[in-house]
Structures are given as structure tokens and as C-alpha cells.
Image: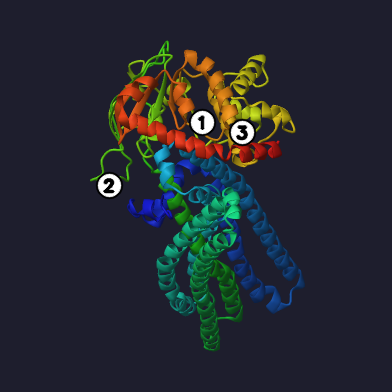
């Protein structure tokens, strides 16, 4: 797993800031007219502000100099109207852009989540959940703020500076040249700022993702940390990460302080020099007092746009970094997709076959052998096939291939003679159901968790209720009736409020409720006590009579449940037969079974403790 998001970034060519942000155009296109109207309103507000110094020039030359109070009142009214119109344009700018920006945020967030759902399991193996969470929430929210505020004001303020700078030459070229020459170094300061702040912005957002991962892991593993007394160790690790982020944020603040220093200092120097030049010009009769007042009023109007450039430029770089981070996920190749011309199975018998199947993980070294190295195995319709083997033999990996959680790297897996890659993922995963040893439940009701794979059933219907009760009965999950609201009790995050055995039984009920043609079970009974396991196996035997079942066995009792057993050894099927046949003919099988029995005896020593824990939980 990557420790940060830097690795995916290195695989992609670096785009310019404008080209990187232009990738947001498909999301912004539907609301672009509103954004343009918002920018137009902001520009109108800026032009109205620039017109006020021109009115002041007329007032100083006319009514103020002559003492005409009537004209002075009308001049004051003109300034007031311009100010009110400017305020109105500012309000319109916000009205035009706030709705569209939230619409873009909504579309981006939905698209990002959909992308996460479609990307293969291999992608999620490599990425930290905290990195994905920070992109989903923090980065997309930043883009919303940038679209609503940053991009509009950046464009408008740059145009305001250009127009205002041109107007400065209206009164005297010497004043305009003095102001622009003194402020010219700001462009160099901006270039230096981009080179330093851009890298810091990327580090900060990546480190925020790492910090989110640390929090998530600590919360999910709180029982382990408490049990081993390692809360202090986790805190120290988190403190180091938080300190690293703090140092990066301080470096960002230093970069911002540096650009702000020049943005404030240089205009002030320009004002002072222009004042001296203006007084000299007035003394030589080349500039009137009214023109000098209007010039400084115009320069004052330009001060905020010039000072804001630093903040808006940093906002631009933050938005660019957020866009890069989001598109690192969008640009990930999805290797597990629907075929161009899919095949449809009209009737499903449930014949499952592995034909010369090879598999290796993407990050495996070239000299390493395939994890699955030429698997040939056929499971007949309605047959229960147990997979046994030592740890690392490839049992769990093999169970991920039929439903295409991973794709084979060579050979193929077939369902009723059809390569599973020729079926749409939706159809394939309707026919193949899975239950994992590490049972994952969602923060929903028991009912919603169990019926997760039955979207064909209307919620609350008699059929849905019948399927729910049957699945819970098979999984011996009667404990749900003792929960506060029965099957309508909302399970806590990932089902951590339940015991391991309870979670496994609900996960098994979910697989049974899906009523697939092929049921793949990755040792789903490992957390159950012996008595409960026997009841579940008896019920499963009835269900599996008409279902093709591939089950990873870590207990001898699970092996007894199977019609045949496949022995995996170093990524290959070394023997297939009934339990009694393999006991007679395979020395390695006898060794594996004895290992399972030893593990069972050790597990039985914990049975009473686990049973008492479940009773307390209830």
C-alpha cells in the first residue's frame, strides 16, 4: 500500500496550471453561463468602482472649487448611486455563482464515488482510505470554493488592474510609469511564489490524507490498541504526522507572508513616489489638484485587487493541486470492465471451472512465481467443493477470481462454459455470491445488510420478509431478535458493535439471501463456536444441495460438508477427491488435515470466552 499519494502522481506527465484546471471543464460546462454571468457582474462592480475617481475629479474641479452646493449634492448622489450599483453587482455575482458551484461539487463528488466503486479491488489494495477520503471531501470542497470565489475574482481583479493601470496614464504619463515600474517586481515575486507554494500545497494535501488514514485506522483498531496498551504509541505516531503537517503549513504561511510583504510594500512605495512626482508636476503646472486627487483615488481602488492577487494566486495553486489529486483517481485504469459484446446466460446450471488459471499481483517481482500457477479444477452443478491447503497456498486468492474481484493473468474461469470475462459484471455477480472470513457490515439495519444483494425485492414486501427469515435461519442468526429493534436495528460502523461470530453469521445470511447459482465461501464460519458451527453447517447443507459451492476450509468439519476436496499446494491443485480418498492417497493432505485439527483444538480453548462475550453483547 502506498504511504502517500505521491506515487500515482509520478506516473503522470506534469501539466501546466491552466491545462490541469481545464480538466474540470466537463463538470463546469453545464453551469458555465451562470459562472460567466457571475464574472460579468464582478467585472461590472469593479468598473463601477473605477468610475468613482473620475466622478471625484469632476467634483473637485467643479462644485468644490466653485462652491456650488447644488452641483455638489448631485455629485454626492452620483457617487452614492455608483456605490449602490457596485454593491448590487457584488450581490449578483454571489447569486450567480453559489448555486452552480455547489452543483459542480455535487457532480464531482458523485462521479468520484462512482469511480471508486468501479475501480478494481487491486486499486483499493494500493491506496490508503484516508487519501481517498481527503480527496472526496477536502479537495472537492476546495474546488467548489475556487469556482465560486477564486476563479471569478482572480480574472476580474487582473482585468481591474489592467484597466486601472491604463487609466493612471490619463492624468500624466509620469505618474502611470512611476506606479507601474515600482510595482513591476510583483510579477517576479509571483513567479517565485508559484515555484515554492505549489510544492508545499501538494505536500500539505497529501499529508492531510495520511493524517486522515491514521485517524481512521486508530478508530477502527481501537480495541486492539486498548487490548495491547498501545494507545500511547499510536498517539506518538499521530503526533509526528501532525507535526509534519504543521511544519508544512508553517512553510506555506511563510511563503504567503513573503508574497504579502511585497504586495503591501511595493504599492506603498509607489504611492509615496507618485505623491512626490504629482506634487512636482502640480508645481510646474502640468497637473491640477483635482487630477492629483483623482489619481490617488484610482490608485486606492487598485490597492485591493493588487493585494488580493497573492491570496488568489495561492488559491489557484491549491485548486490546481486538488484537481491533480482528484484526477489521479479518475485517470486510474479500470482493468475489470464489461466486455464490448457481452454474452447472456439464459439458464444457469452453476458449473464452475478453472482452466489453466494463473494469477499474480501487479506489484509482484518478475522473478517470483505466479501465486496461482496453472489451476485446473471443475466444480459440477450442485456440488460442494472444499479448498484446503497450508497458509499461502492461494486458497483465498482463488475464491476472488470467479466474481472477478481480480482477473486471471492467464487461462480462464468459466461459468457454464462461458468465460466470466464475457459476462457483464452485473450479471456475473448476480449468479455468484460470496461470504468472506473478514465479515464487513454497513451502518444500516440488519434487514438492509442481509438483503443487500436482493435489489429485485421490494422493501417490506412479503417475499423480502420470507427471504430474510430464511437466510437468518440458515445462518443461525436468531440473536437479531434480541437486538433493541430486531431486524430493524441499525448496526454500528462496520458491525463493530457485534461479536465476530455474529458478524460472520449476518454476512453468511447475506450470501444465502442472494440465492446465487454459485456460492463462494472463504471460511465464513471461523469465528463460530463448535455447537453453532454444527447447526449452521446442517442448514447450509440443505441450501447447498441445489447450489454449486466453493468453500475454503480451515476446519475438518467444513471439509466434511463437501462432496469433494481440492488440495492446493504452492499455487497448484495437487489432488482432488473425497475426504476419505485423499486421506488414503495423499500424505500432504493428511498433514494439512492434522494441521487443521491442531488449530481447531487451540480455537476450542477460546470458545467459552467467546460465547460469554456474545452473551454480554446481547
* Disc assigned to residue 433: none
Is residue 171 rendered to the left or right of residue 465? left
Residue 588's spot in the image, x, y percent? Answer: 32, 32
Which coloring applies here? rainbow
- Residues under labels 2 and 3: Cα distance? 39 Å
Task: Kindly check if marks 1 and 2 are in contact, taking CB atoms under 8 A apart as contact.
Answer: no
Sequence-earlier tag: 3 or 1: 3
Whether 499 is drawn above or below 40: the answer is above
Which is more foreground, mark 2 or mark 3? 3
Whether 387 is drawn above or below 246: the answer is above
| Residue at the disc numbered 3 | 502
Q: Please indicate, yes or no, whether residue 97 appears anywhere in the rendered image.
A: yes
Residue 213's spot in the image, x, y percent? Answer: 52, 53
- Residues under labels 1 and 2: Cα distance? 31 Å
Residue at 23%, 46% in the rendered image: 367
Residue 354's spot in the image, x, y percent? Answer: 32, 24
Task: Kindly check if marks 2 and 3 are in contact, taking CB atoms under 8 A apart as contact.
Answer: no
Rendered-image quadrant of the C terminus: top right
- Residues under labels 3 and 1: Cα distance? 11 Å
Whether 59 is drawn above or below 12: the answer is below
Q: Please indicate, yes or no, whether residue 336 appears anywhere in the rendered image.
A: no
Sequence-earlier tag: 2 or 3: 2
Task: Kindly check if marks 3 and 1 are in contact, taking CB atoms under 8 A apart as contact.
Answer: no
Sequence-earlier tag: 1 or 2: 2
Element assignment for label 1: loop
In this rendered view, identify the residue nearer to me: 569 or 604: 604
In this rendered view, identify the residue nearer to me: 508 or 149: 508
* Disc assigned to residue 524: 1
| Residue at the disc numbered 2 | 365
Label 1 Cα neighbours within 10 Å, binned few <14 / some 14-19 / many ≥20: many
Is residue 304 rendered to the left or right of residue 399? right
Residue at 41%, 42% in the rendered image: 123
Amino acid at each position: 500500500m502506498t504511504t502517500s499519494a505521491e506515487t500515482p502522481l509520478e506516473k503522470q506527465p506534469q501539466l501546466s496550471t491552466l491545462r490541469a484546471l481545464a480538466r474540470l471543464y466537463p463538470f463546469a460546462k453545464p453551469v458555465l453561463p451562470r459562472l460567466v454571468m457571475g464574472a460579468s457582474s464582478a467585472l461590472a462592480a469593479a468598473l463601477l468602482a473605477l468610475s468613482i475617481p473620475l466622478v471625484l475629479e469632476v467634483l473637485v474641479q467643479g462644485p468644490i472649487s466653485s462652491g456650488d452646493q447644488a452641483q455638489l449634492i448631485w455629485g454626492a448622489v452620483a457617487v452614492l448611486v455608483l456605490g449602490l450599483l457596485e454593491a448590487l453587482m457584488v450581490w449578483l455575482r454571489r447569486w450567480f455563482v453559489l448555486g452552480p458551484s455547489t452543483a459542480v461539487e455535487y457532480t464531482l463528488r458523485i462521479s468520484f464515488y462512482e469511480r471508486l466503486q468501479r475501480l478494481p479491488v487491486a486499486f483499493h489494495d494500493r491506496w490508503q482510505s484516508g487519501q481517498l477520503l481527503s480527496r472526496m471531501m477536502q479537495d472537492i470542497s476546495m474546488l467548489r470554493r475556487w469556482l465560486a470565489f477564486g476563479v471569478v475574482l482572480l480574472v476580474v481583479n487582473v482585468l481591474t488592474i489592467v484597466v486601472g493601470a491604463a487609466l493612471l496614464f490619463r492624468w500624466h504619463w509620469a505618474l502611470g510609469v512611476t506606479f507601474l515600474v515600482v510595482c513591476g517586481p510583483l510579477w517576479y515575486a509571483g513567479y517565485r511564489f508559484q515555484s515554492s507554494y505549489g510544492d508545499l500545497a501538494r505536500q500539505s494535501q497529501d499529508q492531510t490524507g495520511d493524517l486522515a488514514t491514521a485517524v481512521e485506522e486508530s478508530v477502527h483498531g481501537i480495541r486492539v490498541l486498548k487490548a495491547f496498551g498501545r494507545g500511547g504509541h499510536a498517539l506518538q505516531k499521530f503526533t509526528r504526522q501532525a507535526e509534519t503537517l504543521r511544519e508544512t503549513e508553517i512553510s506555506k504561511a511563510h511563503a504567503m507572508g513573503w508574497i504579502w510583504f511585497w504586495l503591501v510594500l511595493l504599492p506603498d512605495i509607489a504611492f509615496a513616489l507618485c505623491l512626490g512626482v504629482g506634487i512636482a508636476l502640480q508645481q510646474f503646472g502640468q497637473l491640477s489638484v483635482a487630477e492629483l486627487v483623482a489619481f490617488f483615488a484610482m490608485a486606492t481602488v487598485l490597492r485591493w485587487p493588487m493585494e488580493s492577487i497573492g491570496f488568489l494566486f495561492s488559491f489557484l495553486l491549491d485548486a490546481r493541486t486538488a484537481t491533480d489529486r482528484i484526477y489521479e483517481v479518475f485517470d486510474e485504469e479500470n482493468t475489470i470492465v464489461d466486455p464490448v459484446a457481452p454474452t447472456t446466460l439464459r439458464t444457469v446450471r452453476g458449473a464452475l471451472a478453472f482452466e489453466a488459471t494463473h494469477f499474480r499481483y501487479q506489484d509482484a517481482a518478475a522473478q517470483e512465481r505466479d501465486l496461482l500457477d496453472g489451476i485446473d479444477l471443475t466444480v459440477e452443478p450442485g456440488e460442494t467443493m472444499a479448498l484446503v491447503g497450508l497458509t499461502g497456498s492461494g486458497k483465498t486468492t482463488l475464491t476472488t477470481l470467479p466474481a472477478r474481484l481480480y482477473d486471471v493473468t492467464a487461462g480462464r474461469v468459466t461459468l457454464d462454459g462461458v468465460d466470466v470475462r464475457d459476462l457483464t459484471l452485473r450479471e456475473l455477480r448476480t449468479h455468484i455470491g460470496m461470504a468472506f472470513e473478514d465479515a464487513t457490515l454497513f451502518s444500516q439495519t440488519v434487514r438492509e445488510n442481509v438483503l443487500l444483494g436482493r435489489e429485485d425485492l421490494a422493501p417490506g414486501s412479503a417475499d423480502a420478509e420470507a427471504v430474510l427469515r430464511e437466510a437468518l435461519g440458515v445462518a443461525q442468526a436468531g440473536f437479531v431478535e434480541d437486538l433493541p429493534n430486531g431486524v430493524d436495528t441499525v448496526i454500528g460502523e462496520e458491525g463493530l458493535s457485534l461479536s465476530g461470530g455474529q458478524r460472520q453469521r449476518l454476512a453468511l445470511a447475506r450470501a444465502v439471501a442472494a440465492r446465487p447459482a454459485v456460492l463462494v465461501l472463504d471460511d465464513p464460519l471461523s469465528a463460530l463456536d463448535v455447537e453453532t458451527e454444527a447447526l449452521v453447517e446442517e442448514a447450509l447443507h440443505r441450501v447447498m444441495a441445489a447450489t454449486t459451492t466453493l468453500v475454503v476450509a480451515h476446519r475438518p468439519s467444513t471439509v466434511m460438508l463437501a462432496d469433494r476436496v481440492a488440495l492446493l499446494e504452492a499455487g497448484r491443485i495437487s489432488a482432488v477427491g473425497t475426504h476419505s480418498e485423499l486421506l488414503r492417497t495423499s500424505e500432504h493432505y493428511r498433514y494439512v488435515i492434522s494441521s487443521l485439527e491442531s488449530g481447531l483444538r487451540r480455537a476450542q480453548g477460546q470458545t467459552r470466552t467467546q460465547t460469554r462475550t456474545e452473551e454480554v453483547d446481547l
